[in-house]
Amino acid sequence: MNVSKKAGHRFGAHRVIAPPGTMPQNAWKLDDTPVPFANEILCDVDALNLDSASFAQIRAFCSDDEQKIAEHILATVRERGKQHNAVTGSGGMFVGRVREIGEDLRGIDLREGDAIASLVSLTLTPLRLNAITGVQVASGHVSVRGTAILFESASWSKLPPDIDPGVALAVLDVAGAPAQIERLVRPGMTVVVIGADGKSGVLACARARARLGRSGMLIGVAPRASESATMLVRERIVDRFVEADARDALSLSELVSNEAPALADLVVNCVNVDGTELASILCAKDSGTVYFFSMNTSFTAAALGAEGVGKEVTMLIGNGYTKDHAAIALQTLRDNAAVHAYFKKYYAFARPAERLL
C-alpha cells in the first residue's frame, strides 16, 4: 500500500505498534517502515549520536568492545523500531539526508537531499538500520546505513556548512543546555555547573560566561582535571574549578561553599552518572534554582532529597527543546574558538569502516 497519500497523526501515534494507546516516546515498539505518510519526512541516516547517559551504560555493558556495542545497538533497533535504551530510558539523535518529503509538508524550508540533524530523541524516532559501519567509543558517534522517519511535529536543523557534521551532531544533541542557560543566567549571579567537562557541561559553561560577562562567579565541577576542564580554566571561561565526585554530596557542597560562601543562585547538573541529585541541591542557596539537564536524574531522589534537608529550591527538568536552541548552541561554539577546537578534536567524524556489522 502507498501510505504516502494519507496523513498520519502529527505526533506519530499511528506508528505505535505496542502497547496500544501509547505515544511514540513511551511505546515499546514502533513501525519503522521506510515509506513516509503525507505528513512525514523520510531520511537516509548516516550517523547516530547516543546521549551520554545511554552510551555510558552501553559501553559499560559491552566492556568498550566496538563489535559488541554495534551488536547491542542493532539488536535494540531491530526489536523496538527505534534506539531506546531500556536501562536509561534515553536515546540520542541522528544526522542524515532527506530522501522524501510527504506531500502535506512540501511547503516547509527543506528539500530532498538536504543534510539535516534531528532535534528530537531517537526514543520516539522510527529507525531502521541496515548496517553499522563504525563506532567511536570516545564520542558516542555510531556510523550507520539506515533510514529514519520524522513526524510532522518533529524539530530538525539543517547542518551548517561552517561546522564539521560530527561536531554539529555532538553540539545539537545537547542544544537544550546552553539555550536554557541563556534564559536562566543573569549578570551578577553565582553559577555552578556540575559535570562541566562533558559536552553539555562545556557548552553550558561557555554560554553562562557569555551571559555573566566578568560579573558574578562561575564554578565548574568535574571528578578530575581533564583536558576539557583544563581548557575551561585556561580560557577563563570558569572562575573556579572544583575537582570532586558529585555523588559525595557533603564533600562537594563544602568545597563549593569554600569558593562561594553564599552558595549558588543556579546549579546546572550535566553529569552522566546516578546519585548526584542531593549534591546539586546542597550547592544551591535557599530560593535558588537547580536545572537538571542530566538524563540520569531521579526526580524522586531530587524531590525527597530537598525535603529531607529542608531546602527550598526551584527544580527544573532538562527539557531538550527550547526555542531557538539549535541556533544558540551552534553560535556558542562559533563564539568560542577554544571550545570549538576541543569539539573538533573529539567529535569530528572519523572515516567509517566499509562495514563493522
Image (cartoon, helix red, strand yellow):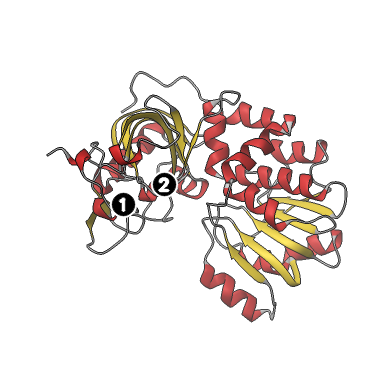
The tally of labels here is: 2
Q: Is residue 155 above or below residue 279?
A: above
Which residue is rendered at x = 73% and y = 34% of the image?
335
Give the side of residue 68 with respect to residue 170, left or right. left
Residue marked by disc 2: 154
Which residue is rendered at x = 36% and y = 37% of the image?
68
Q: Is residue 327 above or below residue 261?
A: above
Q: Which mark is residue 239?
A: none
Which residue is rendered at x = 35% and y = 54% of the image?
11
Question: What x and y, as percent, mark residue 19?
Answer: 23, 61
**As rendered, which of 288 and 114 lies closer to the eye?**
114
Can residue 86 be spotted in the picture? yes
Quadrant containing the C terminus is top left
Tell me how far mark 1 sits from mark 2, CA to CA.
9 Å
For marks 1 and 2, the one nearer the N-term is: 1
The amino acid type found where label 2 is placed reads Ala
Q: Is residue 35 above or below residue 81?
A: above
**As rendered, which of 80 and 2 lies closer to the eye?**
2
Badge 1: residue crowd in 10 Å (few <14, some 14–19, many ≥20): many
The amino acid type found where label 1 is placed reads Gly
Which residue is rendered at x = 25% and y = 64% of the image?
21
**As rendered, which of 289 and 230 lies closer to the eye?**
289
Residue marked by disc 1: 12
Question: What x and y, as percent, mark residue 227?
Answer: 70, 35
Q: Are marks 1 and 2 in contact (CB under 8 Å)?
A: yes
Q: Secondary structure at mark 1?
A: loop
